[in-house]
Amino acid sequence: MQRVFDFLKECGAYYLATVEGDQPRVRPFGTVDIFEGKLYIQTGKVKDVSKQIQKNSKVELCAFNGEKWVRVTGKLVRDERVEAKEHMLDSYPNLKAMYSPADDNTEVLYFEDAIATFSSFTSEPEVIRF
């Protein structure tokens, strides 16, 4: 999981795919955190992406650094604890202008049953489960 985290941080942005009915939805994200041994992302509960995740928690993300890419599939689980939200916002202080651990909008979610596949054009894929 640490390798996935490091790769996502190196890339700076990744793309998260959700589903809305029968329509896939993909958008860029930049937040990633490790808290209590789990890989977290962050969004706002008022956003469509949050509503899509609550209806269908299966997601996939993808990031590419110019040579290699990672795809992470799994379920996202909402963590309502203030401590988890604080940890994320402390990692991304610029978000504190829009989010607060105590507001009813800040949402942090962690991956459950995740499978990360690292790939490139020149080597065999490597799979990590967490």
Image (cartoon, helix red, strand yellow):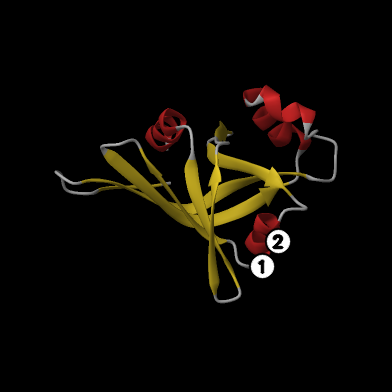
Per the image, the residue denoted by label 2 is: 51
Q: Position of residue 118 (x, y in %)?
A: 30, 45
Disc 2 to disc 1, C-alpha distance: 6 Å
Pick the residue in front: 5 or 11.
Answer: 11
Which amino acid type is shown beneath numbered disc 2? Lys
Which amino acid type is shown beneath numbered disc 1? Lys
Residue at (42% x, 33% y) in the render: 11
The residue at the far right in this view is: 103
Pick the residue in front: 82 or 62.
Answer: 62
Local crowd size for mark 1, using a 10 Å CA cut-off: few (<14), some (14–19), many (≥20)? few
Residue at (58% x, 54% y) in the render: 76
Proximity of marks 2 and 1: CB atoms separated by less than 8 Å: yes
Q: Which of marks 2 and 1 is in front?
A: 2
> Which quadrant holds residue 25?
bottom right
Element at badge 2? helix
> Which quadrant holds residue 21?
bottom right
Q: Is residue 115 above or below residue 81?
A: below
> Which quadrant holds residue 99?
top right
Residue at (28% x, 40% y) in the render: 68
Per the image, the residue denoted by label 1 is: 55
Q: Position of residue 97 (x, y in %)?
A: 78, 28
Q: Position of residue 18 (x, y in %)?
A: 55, 61
Q: Position of residue 61 (x, y in %)?
A: 46, 51
Element at badge 1? helix
Position of 68 with respect to 112 (left or right) is left
